[in-house]
Image (cartoon, grey):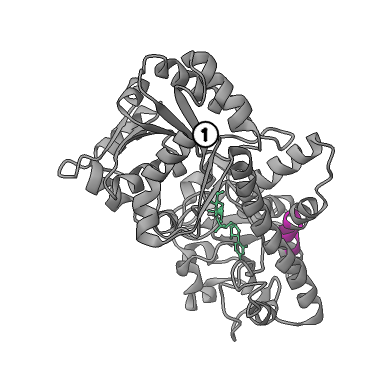
């Protein structure tokens, strides 16, 4: 099949490259020429494990030629199905800003006005229930001067890829959710996903677009709340001197609980859990429903960084002293610092007048935009040298493997928000929930 993917962010670029792999012809459309040029040169525009190899294989000079990038929307006309992967940024009140999606749908609709054959548009971006059916479809109908179900179809296919393991997650999905309000759109989505479904035996959830949209929020809301619940339990464990990880290992043996997403610590960040929980909470309030559990999950998450800082305060006064922050990415395996727990941790250190020395193997440049005035060290050892405390925020292997480097600290107080470091002689160690 010939697919177009509008948007070259984390999701758009990853799925464009992954769809090319089983044999689809894919055109990735983005307004950013530097991203388009990078892809066409066979280079990955983002840091994502396995993506450089895929882009080189399908877009590089000696590649299969199955992946091309362009700024030209007219290329949609040569394709059968278009995936909309545009950003939905968060507004002040937590709700999502649909303006980029609406502008993309408008341009897509105007382009489709020139297409005689059937075309299916699939919304991939995370949007609140009803957005595909009401907002996106009506823009497409108006701009293309066509009727949904007659000349074109619309579907919703939520994404469950995790940053850092997105390529692997694409190839081994737990489920494929195909939301469609008409039969031809559903059939087209099957044609796109059949190679993946056949290869993996992944269960397929066939549903309407509104339910598909809600499944995405429910999935992320549930996982975020699960981490907040284990953090809540972990905080209680810490008060009793009990190791929350030993407790989590035991409760994870219960199939009804499962061992996944039971790592307690400084909490969840990234572009998805914080934004999606905020958006569905705001949407629920619009419907006059108070989302008590998701509110509490968020409040608990907001408090974890301060708990880490107060453990540090118990050991050392950091005013005018050097403090190392180990890890800036919101999790290992990515350079993404959006909503990273390092941000509130650094803000708390700034409030305490500490001199901050931060280290991350790949996310330094992204964090520099947020905090231009703190020191960024090239190695963990350089960050630790002369520090009175170290905060562990991201469990990168480079950080988990630290040993003698702590000897360079003025006072070796290590406060660990991710259970990355082993308790050992020679350091004063505090784990957040153990
Ligand atoms: C999340 C979901 O896991 C994906 O299924 C979804 O597709 C994606 O959001 C999205 O909506 O696009 P992601 O944000 O990449 O993926 O990262 P996760 O691996 O889920 O981690 C999220 C946060 O939770 C990280 O800050 C991580 O450190 C934290 N976390 C996760 C914990 O603190 N403890 C855990 O046990 C697991």
- Looking at the rendering, the stretch of residues picked out in magenta corresponds to 301-307
Residue 72 lies, in percent from the top left, at 34, 22
Quarter assignment of residue 250: bottom right
Q: Tell me if mark 1 has few (under 14), some (14-19) or many (20+) residues whose alpha carbon lies within 10 angstroms of its own.
A: some
Residue at image x 67%, y 72%? 257
* Quadrant housing the N terminus: top left
Kind of element beneath mark 1: loop
**Which residue lies under the disc numbered 1?**
182
Relative horizontal placement of residue 136, taking residue 302 as reference (left or right):
left
Residue 268 appears in the figure: yes
Residue 85 appears in the figure: no
Q: What is the tally of numbered marks visible in this picture?
A: 1
In terms of depth relative to the viewer, which is nearer, 267 or 161?
161
Residue 161 lies, in percent from the top left, at 49, 52
In terms of depth relative to the viewer, which is nearer, 409 or 207?
207
Whether the magenta-drawn stretch holds residue 258 is answered as no
């Amino acid at each position: 099949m010939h697919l177009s993917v509008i948007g070259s962010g984390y999701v758009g670029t990853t799925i464009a490259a992954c769809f090319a792999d089983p044999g689809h012809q894919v055109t990735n459309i983005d307004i950013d020429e530097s991203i388009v040029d990078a892809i066409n040169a066979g280079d990955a525009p983002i840091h994502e494990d396995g993506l450089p190899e895929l882009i080189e294989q399908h877009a590089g000079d000696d590649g299969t030629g199955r992946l091309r990038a362009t700024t030209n929307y007219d290329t949609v006309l040569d394709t059968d199905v278009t995936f909309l992967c545009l950003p939905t940024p968060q507004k002040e009140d937590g709700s999502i800003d649909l303006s980029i999606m609406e502008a993309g749908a408008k341009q897509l609709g105007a382009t489709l006005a020139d297409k005689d054959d059937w075309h299916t548009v699939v919304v991939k971006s995370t949007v609140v229930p009803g957005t595909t059916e009401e907002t996106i479809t009506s823009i497409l109908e108006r701009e293309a001067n066509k009727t949904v179900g007659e000349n074109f179809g619309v579907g919703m296919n939520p994404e469950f890829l995790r940053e850092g393991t997105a390529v692997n997650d694409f190839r081994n999905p737990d489920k494929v959710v195909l939301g469609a309000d008409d039969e031809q759109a559903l059939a087209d989505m099957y044609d796109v996903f059949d190679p993946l479904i056949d290869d993996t035996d992944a269960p397929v959830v066939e549903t309407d677009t509104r339910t598909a949209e809600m499944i995405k929020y429910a999935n992320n809301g549930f996982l975020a709340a699960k981490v907040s619940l284990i953090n809540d339990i972990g905080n209680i464990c810490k008060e009793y001197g009990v190791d929350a990880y030993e407790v989590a290992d035991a409760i994870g043996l219960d199939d009804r609980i499962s061992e996944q997403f039971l790592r307690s610590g400084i909490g969840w960040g990234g572009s998805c859990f914080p934004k999606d929980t905020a958006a569905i909470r705001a949407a629920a309030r619009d419907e006059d429903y108070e989302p008590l559990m998701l509110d509490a999950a968020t409040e608990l998450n907001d408090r974890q960084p301060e708990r880490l800082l107060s453990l540090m305060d118990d050991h050392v006064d950091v005013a005018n002293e050097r403090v190392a922050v180990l890890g800036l990415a919101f999790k290992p395996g990515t350079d993404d610092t959006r909503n990273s727990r390092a941000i509130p941790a650094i803000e708390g250190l700034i409030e305490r007048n500490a001199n901050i020395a931060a280290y991350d193997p790949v996310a330094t440049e992204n964090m520099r935009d947020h905090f231009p005035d703190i020191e960024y060290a090239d190695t963990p050892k350089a960050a630790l040298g002369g520090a009175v405390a170290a905060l562990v925020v991201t469990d990168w292997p480079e950080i988990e493997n630290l040993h003698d480097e702590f000897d360079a600290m003025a006072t070796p107080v290590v406060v660990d928000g991710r259970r990355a470091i082993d308790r050992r002689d020679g350091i004063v160690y505090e784990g957040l929930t153990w």
